Amino acid sequence: MELIQQQVHHGALHLHRLAGFITSTMASLCAPVRDPEVRALRDLKDPVELLREIFRVLGLMKTDMVNFTIQSLRPHLLQQAVQYERLKFQQILDKQPASLDNTDAWLQAAASEETAAFRARRDFPRPDSRGLPRPTAVLNRAYMCLLRWDPRHQNYPETVLMDRARLDDLSRRLHVLVLEASVLLLTSAQFGGVVFSLRGFVAKLRQSVAALLEGSHTREADLKRALLELGGTVLQQVTEALSARGGGGGGLPQESQDLLRGQISDLWKNNNPVRTLIGERVQGFLLATLQGGSPKRSPELPFPLGLVRAELAELGTAFGQIVRFNQTVFGPFYAPILRKLLLPPGEAETAEDSR
């Protein structure tokens, strides 16, 4: 450093030789992903551009170092967060023993649903020796219920209250995704073989559907209005696609237009058959991710969910992260509740005493 300062004072600084030293040092310190950018620095001759690019790449290297440090510390931070949240919740529970009432009711409802479903399908899977659903199955069903939680229902489980904002956001995105896939299925049923093969049609249609449905999940009237407008937009895009393809002819038959517009408008109903079908398939996909599957390694999704696979996988990953952390933190609080719900009274007490 002193040599460089002397060279500057005497006007003998060789900038490109110094730049070569800097880039060599950067090459030895940077992450492999930055190697091409560091090598590109050696080809720059203009001093101003060279210095600008050096500082830019140094900024990227600094970000890489921060990310690496966070990644290295994440397991330790996660363990500390688990212990901290569990301790704080236990302190609240010691002061207010009724702090698990909503959680108890939430798990009880999930246990009833899972037990009924288990008994209905008992002839097909491998039931356990007691003929009871597994605690993990009950817990997974309980988490799935949070994605369709009625916002008017105030008795939200205490153990997931801190995650409610994120779960509500996932629920909103899931609602839009189900409607989007439903519109794609209806449009495909009417004109799929003609327009869905056209380049860019599906992407443009999805963009319009997402834009019109954004913010329509809170009020029924908003959803009805959005779907009514969406029906006209879909028909317009189908007509334009057919015209560009050269097969527009005299336009779409009025009967087909009225049918598709009516089918899309009916999607506001919770019991709409198409919406119900898509919703069940999406719920099945998310449940599979909770049961140990990876969204990225899941089998091929049926049409039209394959068209929204990336968004669905993103939702599954985010949902799985929330669920796994919650299970890690509050597992000791869930265990006695599940034992009480799933085991006969005598066995539940024995299991509790043996702990």
Image (spheres, rainbow, N blue to C red):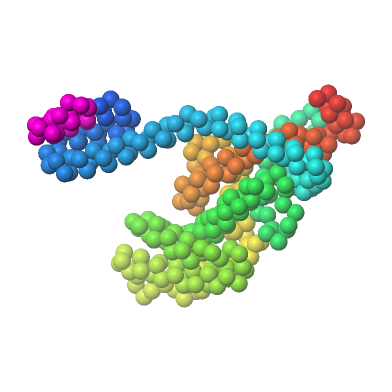
- Which residue is nearer to you in this view: 13 or 155? 13
Q: Residue at x 47, y 34 (%)?
A: 70
Residue 1 seen in render? yes
Residue 338: where, in percent of width, then height?
Answer: 78, 37
Give the position of the C terminus as an image quadrant: top right
Q: Residue furthest top?
A: 354
State the image quarter where residue 272 is shown.
bottom right
Residue 140: where, in percent of width, then height?
Answer: 67, 41
Residue 158 drawn above or below residue 20: below
In the rendered structure, which segment of residues is drawn in magenta? 1-24
State the image quarter where residue 2 is shown.
top left
Q: Residue at x 66, y 38 (%)?
A: 85
Q: Residue at x 57, y 40 (%)?
A: 321
Residue 259 seen in render? no
The verdict on residue 257 being magenta is no
Give the position of the N terminus as an image quadrant: top left
- Which residue is nearer to you in this view: 336 or 46? 46
> Magenta: predominant secondary structure element?
helix
Residue 204 drawn above or below residue 145: below
- Which residue is nearer to you in this view: 316 or 154? 154
**Along the horizontal axis of the image, is 326 left or right of 75?**
right
- Which residue is nearer to you in this view: 26 or 185? 26
Residue 161: where, in percent of width, then height?
Answer: 68, 48
**Along the horizontal axis of the image, is 5 left or right of 337?**
left
Residue 303: where, in percent of width, then height?
Answer: 50, 51
